[in-house]
Structure formats: C-alpha cells, structure tokens
Image (spheres, rainbow, N blue to C red):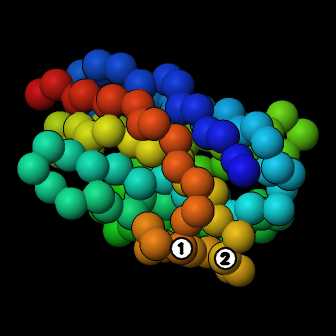
C-alpha cells in the first residue's frame, strides 16, 4: 500500500507559477513510476506528466510541455510538479499517482495508488 498526499495548490494569476508536492509513504517510493493527472469541472481526468522510478525518463502531455516540469526525490519520498506560465485552462484538481507499470505509464488504469488531489485555480 502506498499513501499519497498532495500539497501546494492554490490560486494564482495567469502567467504565474506554482509547485505541487506529493508526499509518499508506505511501500518503497523508488519502486514506482509516478504521474500527475488533472480533472477540470465537467471534464474527464487528463494525463499531465509521468516520471520513471529512476528519474531518467519523463513524458509530458502536449498541453503542458515546455511549461511544466516533473521531478522526484526518492530520498525524501516526494514527487514534484513545477508549473510555470500558467493559463486559465490549467485550472483543475491535480492528483499524483503511483504505478508499478514498467516505463512511463500515461493511462489512469495503469496507476494503482492515488492522492486525494489539490485544487489549482488560475485567474485571467
């Protein structure tokens, strides 16, 4: 079992930045690929980005590539999402997730454990 807790959400103006954190506890964090997903009101959950267990591989959705950066600190059991140049369309609940799937999983069913989510709101 892996427990995930997000923090760092909030309200910022368009063009601003936020950094989300995801603290993991339970089983060995470094054994899992990690990802971030988001869900806006009235929309389906959307893949944002993923990082391999060793941090040597990452993958981004086209909508965030060049603006968001995923990273992890296995010594601290923490996943991060640095979000820059934020847009109103980035407004959503952001959730981190853990997967034993090999490589870089980009589909929600590939993830076994999920955090409760953090609200990110971007004002125009």
Residue reaching furthest to the front: 1
Q: Residue at x 20, y 46 (%)?
A: 40
- Identify residue for label 1: 110
Left or right of 55, for residue 60: left
Residue 33 lies, with reference to residue 81, above or below; the image says below
Residue 41 coordinates in the image, percent (x, y) = 14, 43
According to the image, label 2 marks what residue?
A: 101
Judge from the rendering whether residue 3 lies leftward or rightward of residue 75; answer left or right. Answer: left
Q: In the figure, residue 117 lies in which quadrant?
A: top left
Q: Secondary structure at mark 1?
A: helix
Residue visible at 54% across and 32% down?
6
Above or below residue 18? Residue 96 is below
Q: Quadrant of the C terminus?
A: top left
Of the pair 27 and 87, the residue shown nearer to us:
27
Dot 2 lies on which element?
Answer: loop
Q: Residues within 10 Å of mark 1 (few under 14, many from 20)?
A: some
């Amino acid at each position: 079992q892996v427990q995930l807790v997000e923090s760092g959400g909030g309200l910022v103006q368009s063009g601003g930045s936020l950094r989300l954190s995801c603290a993991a506890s339970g089983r060995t964090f470094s054994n899992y690929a990690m990802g971030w997903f988001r869900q806006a009101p009235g929309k389906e959950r959307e893949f944002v980005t993923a990082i391999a267990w060793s941090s040597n591989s990452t993958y981004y959705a086209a909508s965030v590539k060049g603006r968001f950066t995923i990273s992890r600190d296995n010594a601290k059991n923490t996943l991060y999402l640095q979000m820059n140049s934020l847009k109103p369309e980035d407004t959503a609940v952001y959730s981190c997730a853990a997967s034993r799937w090999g490589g870089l999983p980009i589909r929600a069913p590939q993830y076994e454990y999920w955090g409760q989510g953090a609200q990110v709101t971007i004002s125009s």
